[in-house]
Every structure is written in structure tokens, then in C-alpha cells.
Image (cartoon, rainbow, N blue to C red):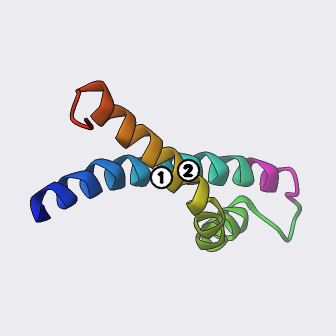
Amino acid sequence: MRILNRYIWSSVLLPSIGVVFTIVALESLFSFLAELENLRRDYRALQGMQYSATTMPRRIYGFLPLAIWLGALTGLGMLANRGELT
């Protein structure tokens, strides 16, 4: 039973990590593009990139429930598609 639990966890966890990475990457890109609109003499693109990078943990924390849910649906859907979930 231990091997089965580990297999199911890995089948759910890997898609969840992929979903977290994708959502946070897109959100960071859009946040950086929004920061580019605020460029002035004292606020440059590098500072906007630093702001986007330092707020990334907050974004990960905010999107984590959604990403785990989508990753679980994706992982369990893949298992059901291959007939391994009966």
C-alpha cells in the first residue's frame, strides 16, 4: 500500500507543481508589464523587476489552493484515463 500511496502522490504532486509554476510565471510577467507602465526617472525597469520578484512568494501563496486543485484534477484525470484509478 505504501508504494501505491507514493505513486498517487507523485501523480498528483508533479502536475500541481507544473500548474503553480505556470500560473506564477504568467502572473509575474503580467505584473512586470504593469510595472513598466509606471516608469519614471526615479523608477526604472530593473526596480520593477525586483518588485515583481520580491512579491512572488505572496503570489505563490495566493495561487497555491487553485494550483493544487487543478493539479489534483489533472493528475487523477491522467490516472483515470489510463485505467489506473479503478
Where residue 31 sits, quadrant-wise, is bottom right
Q: Which amino acid does label 1 sit on?
A: Phe
Towards the viewer: 47 or 27: 27
Residue pictured at 31% horizontal, 31% vertical: 80
SS at mark 1 in the image: helix
Mark 2 vs mark 1: give the one in front.
Answer: 1
Quadrant containing the C terminus is top left
Q: Could you tell me residue 45's position as x and y percent?
A: 72, 59
Label placed on residue 25? 2
**In this image, 57 relative to 55: left or right?**
left
Q: Could you tell me residue 41's position as x and y percent?
A: 87, 65
Residue pictured at 71% horizontal, 47% vertical: 30
Which residue in the structure is indicated by mark 1?
A: 21
SS at mark 2 in the image: helix
Q: Magenta segment range?
A: 33-39
Q: Is residue 74 magenta?
A: no
Q: Distance between the residues labelled 2 and 1?
A: 6 Å
Task: Please rate how many residues cluster around mark 1, counting C-alpha atoms within 10 Å: few if below 14, some from 14 to 19, many from 20.
Answer: some
